[in-house]
Image (cartoon, grey):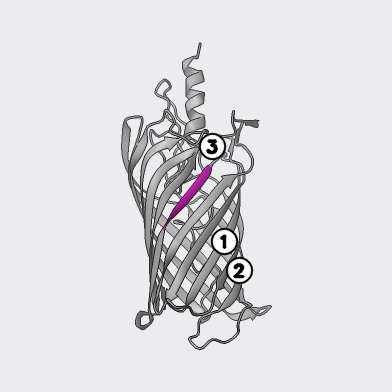
Amino acid sequence: METNSGKCRGDRMLFQKLAGAAIVAGAVVCTSAPTYAAEGITYGGPRGGTDINGAYLPQASGFYGIALLFVAAPDRYYGNNGGPSGLDFRGKAAVPGLGLLYVYPFKLAGGTLGSSVLETYSASRLCVNGTCRTTYEWGDLYSDILMWSRHIGTRESPNGLPYGLTVKAAFSMQFPTGKYETTAPTPSFGNNVYRIIPNVALTYLTGPNAIGDGVEFSAQVFYATTTKNTATDYNSGDTVDIDVGISERTGRWQYGLAGNYAFQLQGDKQYGVELPGGNKIGIVTLGPVVAYQIPSWKSEIKAKLQLPVYTRNTAHQVAGMISIVKAF
């Protein structure tokens, strides 16, 4: 016979990764006990992920402002079998963010150097098994501490585009600056962990074609290691996130498809013991992406939609993002 404490522990295994789809931190809800625990991971890079132009950095040195709005609507929680679980998790979240990119005025080994920071704020209405809560809180700070990008393809082109291959390597981190709650009926936005995220990107732009200026293939791979959550003695396993984009460039426009595949290598542990089944996250998304350059503003606007294709041990959701990058 399953006791109340046993059921609570089982529910905890479901709730660890409500944030795996990049909304909020995972949460644990157990109505048979007066206390809750909250753990969770996000995966990959900055809020909303990466897609087209993944390996590029601006060639002009100086500061660039970043503004974004990420929205998501989870409608259920998927379990270890990749299908709906017994957990009812739904709601809406709007996550605005502001960031800054700095491109250094010198080169290293022929490549451009840059650093960035991004802070987000969440306004959400989330419900877990019928218990709902509205929250407004800061998220964890994300930083590309150092990025290096080099174009190794064709050196010159008639329209100034970087035809051929461009590569990028970066060392990134996420810092636990956001609000974190160990006793809450729905997820908090902070994770209470540091995340170390080395990553590499490749972008290849073909020559002009019948449609426009060329087809771009872009891929970025993030490897994320998460420190122990000291409030709950919980360890999330390492994750690999592969973000891809295939697009056509036509004048100021760029449009195509973007997606990602994220998976976890080791199972989660609490108190040094791996959870049954590992509670490993798995996500595949795909959707359209479009960008438009505005030279008179020294900026680019981008929008994309993320549709769930496969979900395991996290929230099943539709998400979208709009962002603008502007040179100062």
**For residue 163, what is the image quadrant?**
bottom right
Give amino acid for label 2.
Answer: Lys
Q: Is residue 24 above or below residue 35?
A: below
Q: Nearer the viewer, residue 246 or 111?
A: 246
x, y percent for residue 252: 39, 78
Q: Residue at point 44% right, 58% down?
A: 119
Q: Residue at point 49% right, 65% down?
A: 246
Residue 169 makes an appearance in the image: yes
The residue that mark 3 highlights is 231
The residue that mark 2 highlights is 168
The residue that mark 1 highlights is 220
x, y percent for residue 183: 43, 33
Q: In the rendered structure, are the residues bearing label 2 and label 3 in contact, judged by CB atoms less than 8 Å apart?
A: no
Q: Residue at point 54% right, 66% down?
A: 218
User: Rounded to the nearest whole Å, what is the CA distance between mark 1 and mark 3?
Assistant: 32 Å
Numbered badge on residue 45? none
Q: In the rendered structure, are the residues bearing label 2 and label 1 in contact, judged by CB atoms less than 8 Å apart?
A: yes
x, y percent for residue 287: 41, 56
Task: From the viewer's perspective, tell me whether residue 273 is left or right of residue 10.
Answer: right
User: Rounded to the nearest whole Å, what is the CA distance between mark 2 and mark 1?
Assistant: 9 Å
Farthest front residue? 210
User: Rounded to the nearest whole Å, what is the CA distance between mark 2 and mark 3?
Assistant: 36 Å
Task: Tell which circle, 2 or 3, labels the residue nearer the N-terminal end.
Answer: 2
Task: Tell which circle, 1 or 3, labels the residue nearer the N-terminal end.
Answer: 1
Query: Which class describes the residues within 10 Å of circle 2: few (<14), some (14-19), or many (20+)?
Result: many
Which quadrant of the rendered structure holds the C terminus? bottom left
Query: Which class describes the residues within 10 Å of circle 1: few (<14), some (14-19), or many (20+)?
Result: many
Query: Which class describes the residues within 10 Å of circle 3: few (<14), some (14-19), or many (20+)?
Result: some
Give amino acid for label 3.
Answer: Ala
State which region is magenta: 282-287
